[in-house]
Image: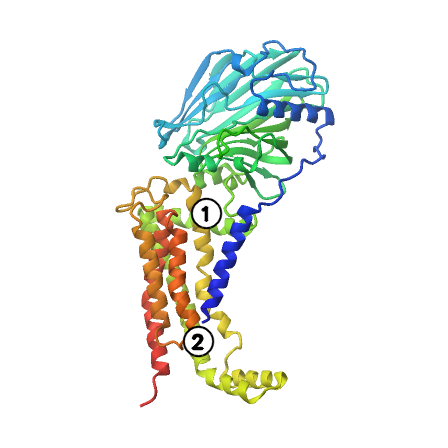
Amino acid sequence: MDKRFFLALFLSLIAIAVSQLLFPPPKPVPSSHRNGVNDSAAKKMAASSTNEALAPESSGVPAGVSPTKSPGEKTSVSTRAVGETTVVSTQKAIYKFSSIGATPVSVVVREYRNRSPVGGLVDFGTLGNPLVHYRLITATDTADLSQVPFSALRTRTKTGEEALTYNGSVGSHAVSISYVIPQDTSASYLVRVSGRISGVQSPGYLIIELPRTLQPTEADTAGDHRTLAYSFKPQRDHARSVLFGSLDPGEKTLEPGPLNWVAVKNKYFVFGILSLPNGTPFSEATLTGGPRTSKIATNAAASVVQEVRDGAFGYEIYAGPQESQRLARVGRDFDHVNPYGWRFLQGMVHPIASKVIQGLLWMHNRLNLTYGWVLIILGILVRLVLWPLNQSVMRSSLKMQELQPKLAAAQKKYKDPVQQREAIMKVYNDAGVSPFAGLTGCLPALLPMPILFALFFVFQNTIEFRGVPFFWLHDISVKDPLYVLPLLMGASMYLLSWIGMRSAPPNPQAKMMGYMFPVMMTVVLINMASGLNLYYTAQNIAALPQQWLIARQRAKAVRPAG
């Protein structure tokens, strides 16, 4: 087996990844197609979003709109009125709502601690800023609801769910916004929102402003900030994610609809708004880069448009962890809120990563083992599945080794390319060996690679691994603090190569790769999640017995008779 193939493959993958990082795809140019939103309303929405993102201290009245203020409007976000706060508690979360703007201002997740220096529990809220706020756009005017005082009415539905309804008025419009918070754990972190607005003449649109940032929740606050992104799911396309860092300050990107959901996320947590399963989808979303105070982008803006039909609107809010099974139960492909793989690999990596996660969770739940042992079992299982293929490849390799003298003799005897090719094919046919047998020898090494790549992305955002200890490792989702596993992984890989080269024909390139490839992989994985190194190490060690058997059979094949 020619080790140069592995070097070429590995270097090609590295080159592709680096090129994507250094030369990202051109950013989408805002489309003129507005999916049914008329030009005047769209311009007001875009101007409003841009002004607020770039100059939060400016007037709340969007540019290009008459300066006439709606009742309750203020001239500055900094002078935001202090309203009455209502607290709703469930088994999983604590919600806080403000009567000013009728919006949620905080969601505290009970089961997850904030590992950043702030401490305490994970909280989606930021001081002085609502999690969402609303604007109403009609053919004639724009109304900012973020400063309008509402009165609250707290009730319970027939099914025992907590319901909080806010009533208020802005201009000639009476506005009612209701939040229904389920108490059962199956619908945890999901809040249903419905609203009615009187006197809205078609066309009318509700603008929902998403949070501009999420507070860091991990000890590596800079790394957590780097994962800040807006994700969205077009109805007829794959989910996509736009990092805050890829949006230049003031840069606007229009994402046309219809959209099933739009969300803001960091490494492990997500705040998203989802259109109702049989309701009105979101018409479009505008993403705007925020001002930079450091090299890392920590804030941006997202405005989502939903058409107000017959004076009504509705959607759902999810504010919670990126637990894969929970997100899958939400439906609408919300489990794709964190698309696995770079954009050019997403179609291949995401399905594999999803299956790998499902398999790991299934083994964890059924076997009642920690994820560390589950990863070890997965590595061993992958090698056991590949055992028959390795044996078949070994037999083909031995036959190819036996044919080498005959192939060399045919090449030496016939100088004419046509005659030489015919002679070589005759050697293969007489021996019953395929000319492509040499290529199949690479399959055992290539087949585990998709799982390895999938695990690379899985460990970036899978909250199930967060804080999971294993022996000396305090958290398998972060790097090994003692670097034991990366070094053990490199050593086991070198041992595999050394055993594989025993009794093999002399090959200087293969010998060089036997030294270089383990070193390269150790350098690449040394700062990766320790769970990833644990899986790869287990796979290497599980492959040692078969590699030794193959080397032994090869030695017998080349041993002279007698």
Q: Quadrant of the N terminus?
A: bottom left
In the image, 79 versus 23, the foreground residue is 23
In the image, 258 versus 156, the foreground residue is 258
Give the amino acid at mark 1.
Phe
Give the amino acid at mark 2.
Ser
Give the SS element for disc 1.
Answer: helix
Q: Is residue 226 above or below residue 433?
A: above
Q: Is residue 157 visible?
A: no
Task: Indicate which disc residue 391 carries.
Answer: none
The residue depicted at 48 percent of the width and 40 percent of the height is 328
Residue 420 placement, left or right of 86: right
Q: Is residue 277 above or below residue 47?
A: below
Task: Indicate which disc residue 457 carries.
Answer: 1
| Marks 1 and 2, how far apart at CA | 34 Å
Q: Position of residue 433 (x, y in %)?
A: 50, 80
**Crowd around label 2: few <14 · some 14–19 · many ≥20 (10 Å):** some
Give the SS element for disc 2.
Answer: helix
Q: Position of residue 157 (x, y in %)?
A: 48, 21
Residue 172 placement, left or right of 367: right
Q: Position of residue 507 (x, y in %)?
A: 42, 74
Question: Quadrant of the rendered structure where residue 479 is?
Answer: top left
User: Hey, which residue is sitting farthest left in the picture?
Assistant: 471
The first of marks 1 and 2 along the sequence is: 2
Q: Quick check: marks 1 and 2 in contact, CB under 8 Å?
A: no
- Residue marked by disc 2: 397
